[in-house]
Image: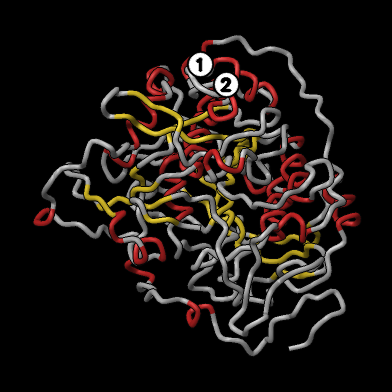
């Protein structure tokens, strides 16, 4: 190892492979997405606290749009996450489109694009499950297409710099290769106590927003104690979603105790279903192996699903709702979409710092006239530091003291926020992009590092910052 004068320690290239970091056994490629339940084991019932995907859609009024023929057709949702697998519910031809893999799994071709963690596939099911695994796999926008932008590795490892690179990539490639990316789902946050007016991560989400893409992010899962949304949810331009959970005694949704509250100035824009949501499972994945109690068996299809709670789930539900609105009215700007959803949310008796405008009501939004609105908050310069953005979340290596800190991005090159911000503003942070016949990126350069699917260094960092809250009562993050 060699240390730099910034205090960052660089990972040795002779370090162990990613498989060596994991405690799970990765299933053979041919078995990924296989149903783990059989008719013989399909017994028992799902308890009353479980929120099924059809209930998620119904709670927000999605069936009203479905009946009018709007199911998200023609709308692409970029899921920046741990990958997406074509499991039952996402198995229709062309449903999941692999676009780019910026994760530490990418150098291994058999792992590239695939979700070995389980989080990304679970989110994609909520957004756009197509029912190919039965009714319980029907998401909010079953006709939308998922664009798989992988940044998280098998154990959840991801650095803020990878998320920024992914946002840059989406903003530059929203219509490339026949895509129509109108929504980004980002169920990720850090606890970095930053000023959004200078933060690189908030600058990246703003750039995507200003490129005409609705950016939906999770508000965070710190409950009432912190009174501050996570980053980048604290940026006022984008849509920050809080979580609500089903109250079976009252047959209604209420704000979840684990959902982060705002500070009275920047609050969640609204809340959406996020508690005990049963969505798609990746058998043998990190989550599936680590939290077996989160597995439930749908008594109708006998499909094994995975149940979790968090603002991740709430953000995914919102992304599906946005896809429905954009199919209904394709000319809506991101500002208009946000205005429609905020202004028509169902007001609840509770604190605005926790509920925001209320419960998401996409049926109400679909019936409301679109106003000519433009947000005029101060814009982020993006010239802050990566280190402040990370907060307490740092990637670590196998060697003690091997930590990614300072102004270096995850691919082991120095990072100049000022230089990057200028390029990102022009949507030119990525250069030399090449794609294969399926539209997947095969080469490109971002901030001094060239990607060819096998050349990312630092491929064994570990550490997880995804915005999951609990998986059947087991803390995660």
* Residue 351 locus on image (x, y percent): 55, 24
Q: Is residue 207 above or below residue 395?
A: above
Q: Residue sitting at 35 percent across and 42 percent down?
A: 276
User: Foreground: 41 or 144?
Assistant: 41
How many numbered callouts? 2
Q: Is residue 53 left or right of residue 149?
A: left
Where is mark 2, residue-wise?
Answer: 357
* Residue 476 locus on image (x, y percent): 46, 57
Local secondary structure at mark 2? loop
Q: Is residue 466 above or below residue 123?
A: below
Q: Is residue 124 above or below residue 250?
A: below
Badges 1 and 2: C-beta atoms under 8 Å apart? Answer: yes
Q: Residue sitting at 30 percent across and 61 percent down?
A: 292
Q: Residues within 10 Å of mark 1 (few under 14, many from 20)?
A: some
- Residue 79 numbered tag: none
Q: Is residue 396 left or right of residue 97?
A: right
The disc, 1 or 2, on the residue closer to the chain's N-terminal end is: 1
Q: Is residue 331 left or right of residue 145?
A: right
Q: Residue sitting at 62 percent across and 78 percent down?
A: 397
* Residue 460 locus on image (x, y percent): 59, 77
Where is mark 1, residue-wise?
Answer: 347
User: Foreground: 300 or 235?
Assistant: 235
User: Foreground: 102 or 59?
Assistant: 59
């Amino acid at each position: 190892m060699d240390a730099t004068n910034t205090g960052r320690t660089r990972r040795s290239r002779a370090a162990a492979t990613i498989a060596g970091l994991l405690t799970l056994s990765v299933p053979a490629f041919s078995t990924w997405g296989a149903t783990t339940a059989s008719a013989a084991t399909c017994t028992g019932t799902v308890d009353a606290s479980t929120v099924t995907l059809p209930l998620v859609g119904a709670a927000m009024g999605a069936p009203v749009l479905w009946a009018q023929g709007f199911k998200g057709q023609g709308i692409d949702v970029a899921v920046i996450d741990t990958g997406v697998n074509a499991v039952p519910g996402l198995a229709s031809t062309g449903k999941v489109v692999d676009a780019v893999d910026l994760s530490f799994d990418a150098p291994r071709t058999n792992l590239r694009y695939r979700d070995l963690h389980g989080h990304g596939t679970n989110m994609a099911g909520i957004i756009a499950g197509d029912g190919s695994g039965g009714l319980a796999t029907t998401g909010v926008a079953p006709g939308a297409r998922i664009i798989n932008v992988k940044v998280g590795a098998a154990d959840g490892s991801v650095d803020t710099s990878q998320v920024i690179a992914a946002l840059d990539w989406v903003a530059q490639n929203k219509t490339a290769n026949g895509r129509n990316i109108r929504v980004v789902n980002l169920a990720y946050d850090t606890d970095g106590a930053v000023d959004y007016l200078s933060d690189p991560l908030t600058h990246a989400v703003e750039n995507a927003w200003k490129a005409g893409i609705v950016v939906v992010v999770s508000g965070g899962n710190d409950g009432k104690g912190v009174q501050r949304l996570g980053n980048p949810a604290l940026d006022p331009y984008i849509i920050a979603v809080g979580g609500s959970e089903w109250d079976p005694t009252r047959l209604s949704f209420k704000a979840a105790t684990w959902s982060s509250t705002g500070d009275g100035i920047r609050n969640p824009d609204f809340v959406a279903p996020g508690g005990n949501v049963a969505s798609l499972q990746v058998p043998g994945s990190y989550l599936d192996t680590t939290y077996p109690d989160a597995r439930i068996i749908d008594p109708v299809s006998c499909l094994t699903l995975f149940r979790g709670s968090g603002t991740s789930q709430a953000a995914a539900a919102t992304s599906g709702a946005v896809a429905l609105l954009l199919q209904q009215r394709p000319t809506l700007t991101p500002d208009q979409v946000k205005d429609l959803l905020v202004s028509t949310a169902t007001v609840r008796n509770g604190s605005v710092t926790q509920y925001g405008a209320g419960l998401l009501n996409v049926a109400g939004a679909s019936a409301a006239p679109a106003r000519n609105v433009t947000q005029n908050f101060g814009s982020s310069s993006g010239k802050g530091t990566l280190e402040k953005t990370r907060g307490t979340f740092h990637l670590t290596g196998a060697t003690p003291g091997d930590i990614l800190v300072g102004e270096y991005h995850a691919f082991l090159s120095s990072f100049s926020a000022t230089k990057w911000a200028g390029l990102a503003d022009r949507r030119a942070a990525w250069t030399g992009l090449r794609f294969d016949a399926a539209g997947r990126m095969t080469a490109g350069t971002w901030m001094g590092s060239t990607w060819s699917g096998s050349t990312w260094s630092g491929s064994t960092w570990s550490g997880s910052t995804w915005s999951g809250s609990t998986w059947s009562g087991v803390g995660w993050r």
